[in-house]
Amino acid sequence: MGLDIKIPIGLMFSIFGLILTILGLVTAGDNAMYEQSLGYNINLISGVVMLVFGGFMLFTSSLFKKKKKEEEE
Amino acid sequence: MQTTFSLGTIDWAIILIYFIFVLGIGWALKRYMKDSTAFLEAGRSLPAWVTGLAFISANLGAIEMIGMAASGAKYGMMTVHFWIGAIPAMIFLAIFMMPFYYGSKARSVPEYLKLRFDEKTRGFNAFAFAIMTVFSSGISMYALALLAQVIMPLQIDWNFMGVHIGEFDFYLMVSAVIVLVYMVLGGLTSAIYNEVLQFFLIVIGFAPLVFIGLKDIGGWEGLKANLPENMIHSWKFAGSADANPLGVEWFGVIMGLGFVLSFGYWCTNFLVVQRAMAAGSMSAARKTPLIGAIPKMFLPALVVIPGMIALALSNIGELDIPLKAGTNVQDFDKVIPVLLMRYMPMGVLGLGITALMASFMSGMAGNVSAFNTVFTYDIYQSYIRPKQSDKHYLKVGKWTTVVGVLASIMTAYVARSFNNVMDFLQLIFAFVNAPLFAAFLLGMFWKRTTGHAAFWGLIGGTISAVIHHGFSLPAGGSAGIKGGFFGLIHTYPSEMAQNFWTAIYAFSTALILTFVITLLTKKLKTDTELKGLVYSLTPRIRDDSKYWYQKPGVLAVVVGAVAIVLSIIFW
């Protein structure tokens, strides 16, 4: 199929990652909010993980493989 | 205790963004849907990692997700037998069966049955399967609406042309419309792509829950300390039925679950097999179940362990698991929402909820996509209007999606009003499915097997399942849906033990009947016709993978070895 699934996956997780990382940074030190997650800033952790994953997906997608694609065509 | 969630703006935003992506994928795929093959078979063009992850995701619908977490709380580590039993089945599918499914150019499992056996065997399977998928999709839809009702308490009280619409109806319609739109736009590819998306969402959305939950209970050691010993071993207590929480001894587990049910499900259920058939090459098709098997082995950590954490926390009085309405029994179906609510602050909470919704929605879509293909090719093209143009069947495929979604909505309401009806239907499907693997096993590996034999073997196996169920009961059960409707000959220690044995009886009867009738009937298909459909008449395939480590055989050995190591660690 013509659409490379890595593009939507990469985009979605990059957006989620960005949102949670910013949220994590803004709410850093908010002990009341992170009391339920035992003091871990779980938004920041998850956000960074998703940013890395989303970025990896985008980077390995066909967006960054233009050369190879042109050769095939 | 608090039973509703309070979702923050960020949580809502995450859910909304997910919906936009789901619909966007369908929209982006629209221009590739030019013929029925593209729409109903994903053009047989997808890479193995995509079909592999979809293969496993298709099995992560509402029933499985909720059921596995609940079983984790009820039975502990023995739940992983569902996984352990599935691994050999997936290896078998990849190495031995996929060459016939993919190589025969059959477009569906019923169509393979038609090529290998005859029309009536195909018809029986196609109709049973079509009904089953509509009901499974309806159950997923029902679960989604229930979940949405709990977590997004909007106040809805509309009147639409005299019909009252409440929250449940609203969420049901919203989810149905979303699934309908992306399925009509992108067909099977849409379903598969969304399953891949769902897979990553479940892993990333549930990992924080397991991490925090384990920290809270004191790690694996803490979990062990707060649960009965027989819940943290998968095999150690399997020796006798009394010692383990499942109430099944090892023979029942290995034969019933490990062999008949697992192989029956993973090797013959078109819902999962369809994912592999959408792969771009024979090699990719064979690698599909093997790639799916890898996450399958590690998913218990994400789904079963939360159930165990919830029970351990409730054992030390740290967590209230809500009770089932009007009873004193803890409702383990709610453990995941309860844990999400306890540990997840705004942000990751939205992510966890999105993961659950993704699982329910793709549970719906997966079933609808399988229904589409079977209905269009095996029912419409075979019995209603054969020999039409491909454009015609593409159109029918799209309309079938609409019909499938509408039928699922109806079954969702059926599920809501009569809980027993769903139990009853699941039971019937278990009766129909258990003998199916016997027909495939004989059909694929013994060229003499005839169509009449396969058909009557299936019917006979189904009947023997009904008889076995009708004369047995689980401990404490009363006659009716639980069995014993013909009288009582045997009582099993648990419902699961009874189910395993029903499957064993059905399978054995089908195997013996098919064997005997084959010897009594004339072989109607010539060897030439059976080429590519039967093991002994099909040339061995040479795998075209570039490197040795990409070969399905090598992958199969690795998967098998990891499964054995995991079994030993959690013995």
Image: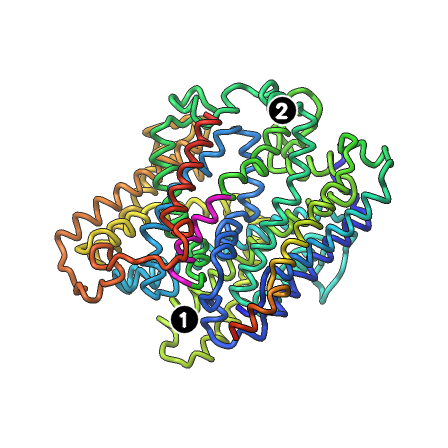
Q: Which mark is residue B320?
A: none
Callout 1: helix, strand or loop? helix
Q: Is residue B459 visible?
A: no
- The image shows residue A53 at horizontal and vertical percentages of 66, 50
Q: Position of residue B421 (x, y in %)?
A: 50, 47
From the viewer's perspective, is residue B158 above or below residue B498?
A: below
Q: Quadrant of residue B244?
A: top left
Of B91 and B120, the residue lying toward us: B91
Examine the rendered structure and indicate whether residue B68 appears above or below residue B516.
above
Left or right, residue B173 beside residue B277? right
Q: Circle 2 sits in a helix, a strand or a loop, which is it?
A: helix
Q: Nearer the viewer, residue B39 or B496?
A: B39
Residue holding disc 1: B380
Q: Which residue is mark 2?
A: B312
Quadrant housing the C terminus of chain B? top left
In the image, are marks 2 and 1 on the same chain?
yes
Reply yes or no: does residue B286 show up in magenta. yes
The amino acid pointed to by label 2 is Ala
Q: Earlier in the sequence, mark 2 or mark 1?
A: 2
| Kind of residue sitting beneath label 1 | Tyr
Q: Position of residue B20 (x, y in %)?
A: 70, 62
> Dividing the picture into quarters, in which one does residue B212 lie?
top right
Number of disc labels: 2
Residue drawn at (27%, 48%), measured in percent from left and top? B460
Q: Is residue A57 magenta?
A: no
Q: Position of residue B450 (x, y in %)?
A: 20, 57
Q: Which corner quadrant holds the N terminus of chain B?
A: top right
Residue range in magenta is B281-294
Camera-side residue of A72 and B172 = A72
Taking the spot 56% from the left edge, 73% from the top edge, the residue there is: A70
Dominant secondary structure of the residues highlighted in magenta in the image: helix
Q: Chain of mark 1?
A: B
